[in-house]
Image (spheres, rainbow, N blue to C red):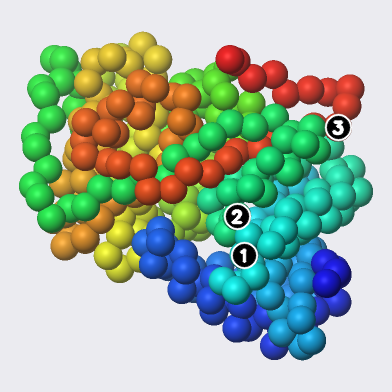
Amino acid sequence: MRARPLREAQARELRPLLDEEAALWYSELGWDFAEVRAAVSGGIERGTLPGRVVAVGSRAVAYSYYMVDPSRVIVGSIFATRAMRGQGLEEELVDAVIEDARAEHAAGRVECQTLFCTATSADGRFESKGFASRARHYMRRELGAPVPEPKPLPHGIVLRPLKREDLPAAAEIIYTSHQRSVDAALNMTYATPSTCRAFVDTLVVRSGCGQFDAEASRFACGPRGPLGVLIASRLSRANGHVCQVSVNPAAQGSGLGAALVTRALQAFRGQGLASATLSVTASNERAHRLYERLGFSVQRAFGAHAWVRPPAAIELSA
């Protein structure tokens, strides 16, 4: 079996595979993949979506795709049908897609987070190809039990709903809180104030990670200005997601992060949702401990990978 270009495939070849993928991520991650599935299917139909597909006869059994933007190439799903998992197809796809992505015109950076990959062994292929990598955790909390009230915040800090006019300040908080972090090194989203602003707009205005949840999203201000932000979404009718939570370094350790997440959980529960999810870099011990105290547990481990064309290099802290 050969991984041929996705642009050569017909949408009907992949339709059953895309249906299976959407069902898997809904059952395992609480993520409604309908919009992603529609976008991928449309790109295949138009012959514009780059990637690779493996087929047996006229039936696709594995595929991967990537997206190209001005600053990087982002690898998306790496998916194999249940009967073909663990047979090296995901690794073959990673090798082929990395080669294709690096060959894209002016592609100086390639990134991938393997949350939507059906083989954990595929993470090793990125490292063998010179990618910088770190482990991440997808965490989940059931909302059947009440959410405890957070500890009182220092005097003068106020939490309120996130408003559209807060988005520039929210982006600045996210950028400041991620400077010199592993996340910023592996994800261009956090690299500059402008990329953080584009990220915030994607989450809030364009619903880039589920449907934006205004009721659960929060903005924190103190006597001297903005201090923290939490952006929440609905990944499905029953699952709320913390897309981003950031606290200005000057306010870290004050209990603000716990208060932001707790208020989001209370809002999710008040809306009748069954669960809440979030992702965190495994080495971010402070955040990891906080989420565990708030009742989250690891549901899925995956990798964050990034490569830049030499002589540039990605420096990660130990």
**Label 1 SS:** loop
**Residue 45: image location, x then y, percent:** 74, 81
| Image position of 312 with respect to 4: above or below | above
Residue 223 figure quarter: top left
**Label 2 SS:** loop
Task: State the residue position of label 1.
Answer: 85
- Residue at figure coordinates x 25%, y 48% from the top left: 141
Residue positioned most to the top: 250
Give the amino acid type for the residue marked by disc 3 in the picture: Arg
Estimate how packed mark 1 is, as few (under 14), some (14 to 19) or many (20 or more) residues with alpha carbons within 10 Å. Answer: some
Task: State the residue position of label 2.
Answer: 119
Residue 224 seen in render: yes
Q: Which callout, 2 or 3, points at the residue further toward the start of the chain?
A: 2
Asked whether disc 2 touches disc 1, contact meaning CB atoms under 8 Å apart, the reply is yes
Give the amino acid type for the residue marked by disc 1 in the picture: Arg
Residue 195 seen in render: no
Q: Is residue 195 left or right of residue 75?
A: left
Q: Which mark is residue 313?
A: none
Q: Nearer the viewer, residue 116 or 189?
A: 116
Q: Is residue 55 left or right of residue 184?
A: right
Q: Nearer the viewer, mark 2 or mark 3?
A: 2
Q: Which callout, 3 or 1, points at the residue further toward the start of the chain?
A: 1
**Residue 126: image location, x then y, percent:** 73, 41
**Residue 16: image location, x then y, percent:** 60, 83
Q: Where, quadrant-wise, is the N terminus in this rendering?
A: bottom right
Estimate how packed mark 3 is, as few (under 14), some (14 to 19) or many (20 or more) residues with alpha carbons within 10 Å. Answer: some
Q: Which mark is residue 309?
A: 3
